[in-house]
Image (cartoon, grey):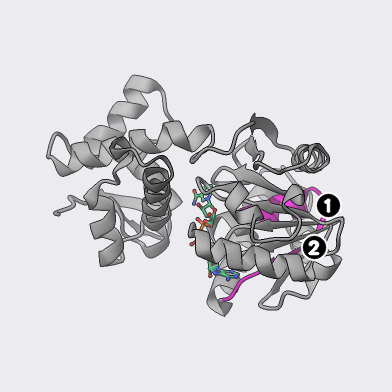
Amino acid sequence: MKITVIGGGIMGSGIGQVAAQAGFDVTIVDVSEEGLDRAKTSIAASLEKFESKKKIQSAAEVLSRIQFSSEWDSVEQADAVIEAVPEKLELKKQVFEKLDRLAGEDCLLASNTSTLSITAIAGATSRPEKVIGMHFFSPVPMMALLELVKGYQTSEETYEKAKQLGEQLGKRLITAEKDYPGFLMNRIWLPMVNEACFALMEGVGTAEEIDQGFIDGYGHKMGPLRTIDMAGIDTTLWAMESLYEGFGDPKYRPCPILKKMVEAGDLGKKTGKGFYTYEGGVKEDAKRVVV
Ligand code: NAD
């Protein structure tokens, strides 16, 4: 089975890796050569860790199943395409318009969107019944969960195909039966991390204290601010904006701190600086954010 992943960032590289580990032939497509290089480096590093922990036999063998490309030819032969480009509706619609022109008629078309309408994304194609949300969690090779999201027109056949693919990828599945912004998980998770940002902005506590509280008080492995540093401050802001626009409810108003950080280019671990600073992937020290 052949899988093409569109977008080789944090999520696309993780999805591509997991698909290659499951034995699929994978192509990761990205507009940026730098992005493709980064994807290859991060996948190779992750596979080496898995190999040293004896979770896979050969990192080189898994890596050899992944092609990295700025061309879209692989879409024509793909059995499934999973889109993981930035959380912007217009961009995702353009990607799906193009997929609709290139993909074979039996190809499963999936979006890894965190919050956006699967129905609207599917509407950019002439085959909305074949489009579904496959929402993975980061880091994809470590997180068991896959949230399937049914768009308004997603067919039962498409849902069954996506379910089977998710199981082949070794994921545990939950399903959002209705296509509301943020689906099941992010509708609940994002307002909470947004509130953590407001608490920080209002000076109620430091980033370290907020995060420590979640670890010691609620048993989380990582606090909310550290988690969104990993996910990307830009991705978190856009996802929050999508909830706000999608529901039209002020309770989803994105915290201004997120906007300021994106304007400043502090996007979290991927740029080395977010709520914390990072060097070589290691948290160095807490950074107080001044709005
Ligand atoms: P990212 O910024 O790390 O990666 C996006 C990649 O897409 C970049 O490498 C970029 O060069 C590439 N890209 C942009 N336009 C493109 C195009 N037209 N064609 C091909 N590639 C293109 O973002 P990410 O964190 O991987 O997020 C991707 C999607 O996954 C978003 O919809 C996001 O909401 C969702 N998501 C993210 C997380 C997370 O924790 N980061 C979790 C679940 C879902």
**Residue extent of the magenta highlight:** 14-31
Could you tell me which quadrant the C terminus lies in? Answer: bottom left
131 or 16, which is in the foreground? Answer: 131
Mark 2: amino acid:
Arg
- Above or below, 71 against 180 in this view is below
In terms of secondary structure, where does tag 2 sit? Answer: loop
Q: Is residue 290 magenta?
A: no
The label shown at residue 23 is 1
Residue 75 picture quarter: bottom right
Where residue 206 sits: x, y (%)? 18, 39
- Above or below, 91 against 201 in this view is below
Question: Residue at the spot x=61%, y=55% of the render?
Answer: 121
190 or 158, which is in the foreground? Answer: 158
Question: Residue at the spot x=33%, y=28% of the render?
Answer: 214
Quick one: label 2, few (<14), some, or many (20+) residues within 10 Å? some
Left or right: 180 in relation to 175: left
Question: Residue at the spot x=80%, y=41% of the render?
Answer: 168
Left or right: 132 in relation to 247: right
Where residue 273 sits: x, y (%)? 31, 59
Mark 1: amino acid:
Gly
Left or right: 13 in relation to 267: right
User: Is the C-beta separation of discs 1 and 2 under 8 Å?
Assistant: yes
Residue 92 picture quarter: bottom right
Mark 1 or mark 2, which has the lower sequence index?
1
Could you tell me which quadrant the N terminus lies in? Answer: bottom right
* Disc 1 to disc 2, C-alpha distance: 8 Å
Q: Is residue 28 magenta?
A: yes
**Which residue, given by chain and number where applicable, does mark 2 sit on?**
65
